[in-house]
Each structure stands twice: as C-alpha cells, then as structure tokens.
Amino acid sequence: MQEINCSKVEEHKKRIVNAIRYIDDHPDEELTLETVSEAAAYSPFHFHRIFRLITGETVQSYILRRRIERCAFYLASRKNMPVKEVYLQFGFSSHSSFNKAFKKHYGLSPSAFRKSAPESFHRISAEYSKNGQTNAVFSQYICHIENLLNWTKMNLNIKVTDFPEMNLAAVMSLGVAHVETSFNILIDWAKTKKLFPGKNVKMLSVYHDSFKVTPPDKVRIHACMLLDEPLQRQEGEVFPETAEAGKFIVGSGEVTLADFEQCWVSLFLWMNENRYSMRKAFPFEIYHTNFKEHPEGKMTVDFCIPINQ
C-alpha cells in the first residue's frame, strides 16, 4: 500500500476525525462511502484508502462495528428497552440482519447476550476456544460487591450534582495507547495560545466508547482542555467539543492510575444500587493534579457519569 506523505499526515488525521464524528452523529442513517467521504472532504476512492491506513479498518467495517457495540451497550445497560428499538436506533433495518451481525461479532445472539450480562457488568472480552470460535464472556467484578462498596466508601467521595455546559478543546485518540500522545498534542497547541501552563487549567478525558463493548485498542478517548470561551473552529488535530449541561454522579478521590478501573466499576455499581440510570451522554474524568508530580504517583480525579434527572 502506498504510504501517505508525512507532510500531509496532520491534515489527513483532521479529516478522518471529522469523518468519525460524522458517523457517530448519524447512527440511524444510511452511511455510504460517498456521504462519509464528503464529510471528510475526500473523494470516495482516496478516503477509503486513507481511512483504512489511519484506523486499520475499512469504512464499512468501522461503521458496522460501532453500531454493534452501541447496540451491545444498550442491550446490557437498558434491559427494559425492546430489542427492536435498540437495533433501529443504531441503523439496522431488520432483526435478521442485526442478529446475524451481532452473533458474528460477539459469538452470542442479542437475546443471549442481554440475558448473560449482569446489571453492572464492566467489560466484555473475547475468549478463543480450541476450535477457534469466539465466545463473548463477561468478566467478574473486581471483587465481591460488598467489598467493592466498602472500597468505594473509603476511597471516593460520591455526590450527585449539576454541571453547566462546558466548552472544550479536544484531540481524538484511537486506542488507549495513544491517549498520552493526544494530550501532548493538545498541550502543545495550548502553549501556542498561552493557555498552558496555568493555575486553573483543567484537563479531561471524555470516553466516546465503552470498555464494556469496545476493545482497548479501538476505544475512542478525547483528550480535552476546559476553555472559558468556545473554540470557533478546528485547528489541526484540535477541534471544539461541548459537554452538555446536566446531572452527574461524581466520584472524587486521590488515586493511582491502577485504581481507575476500580473507580469506574464501583461508581457504576453505586449508580445501580441507588436506582439512577445513565443519560445518553459521555462519561468523563476531570484531572485536578498530575500524578507525575506526586511521590506515590497519585492524582486527584473526578469520575463523572451523566444520569437522567
């Protein structure tokens, strides 16, 4: 495959980010190569080649995977929502096409997947058996629920509060391994704007995919910086993003990076125990301190889950 000229890499990344955002903003529409490439300002031929080179997937493979994963999340987290309503919401036209695609991806039918998912499951992984078939398996809680709730009380201060709308500057990361690079790009941009360093700078990670249904190397995480005023246009890989106003469960604590998964699991468990339901928005982390500046590698973090009023 022909390599992309290095001088054009940044422009290509910017356009691919626009394409991915377009796909996610139109989950129930017919997304053809032509319509998505137009959003990225490419010809369909060049767009297909460049999208695959940057993301490692074809356009249609990416669209299908995203739709299946979003359906999986709703099947597991909103068990009273009819299956038909789930698959129609995310672009599947019939039960047969949805069932076939879902079973091929997870190794279970949608109904079996929903039945097997515990109320507060936190990860789905692929387990390969000797005959090569893939079975969707739900990992167990990090520890017994009672111990986990006790851990939560000792390590997180949990409250339910309202957040105003937040204006953000964002850089997309495709995969967990690239998050630090995305933050470095964002910080370099902020330095040119004299926004960093600063006393009241707030950095965030916004999760546009769930580890429950998306592999870590494909999860989209937006490295973000809170702005006083909205960013008017995209600048290189940095683009404007808005966190909607609303009610949130916020778990605050001084933790290490190794504690993050347990913080999220315990916070979602607390949400279910207290009869809250997650709103159709993205969870995020707000960082108040830098773990690199702490002798024990700890940082003060707010873990924020959007919930219905």
Image (cartoon, rainbow, N blue to C red):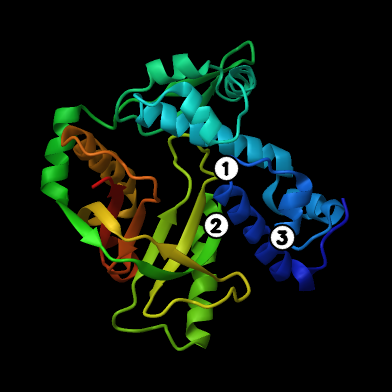
Relative placement, left or right, of 29 versus 221 is right
Secondary element at tag 1: loop
Secondary element at tag 3: loop
Q: Amino acid at mark 2?
A: Ser
Q: Residue furthest top?
A: 131
Q: Which residue is mark 3?
A: 40
Q: CA distance from mark 3 to mark 2?
A: 17 Å
Q: CA distance from mark 2 to mark 1?
A: 20 Å
Tell me residue 88's x, y (percent): 54, 30
Closer to the eye: label 3 or 2: 3
Q: Pointer 1: residues within 10 angstroms few (<14), some, or many (20+)?
A: some
- The disc at residue 173 is 2
Q: Is residue 73 above or below residue 129?
A: below
Q: In the image, what residue occupies the spot 48% across and 34% down? A: 213
Q: CA distance from mark 1 to mark 3?
A: 17 Å
Relative placement, left or right, of 33 versus 226 is right
- The disc at residue 1 is none
Tell me whether the residue at label 1 lies in contact with that at label 3, contact meaning CB atoms closer than 8 angstroms: no
Q: Quadrant of residue 92?
A: top right
Q: Which residue is mark 1?
A: 27
Q: Quadrant of residue 122?
A: top left
Secondary element at tag 2: strand
Q: Amino acid at mark 3?
A: Ala
Q: Earlier in the sequence, mark 1 or mark 3?
A: 1
Q: Earlier in the sequence, mark 3 or mark 2?
A: 3
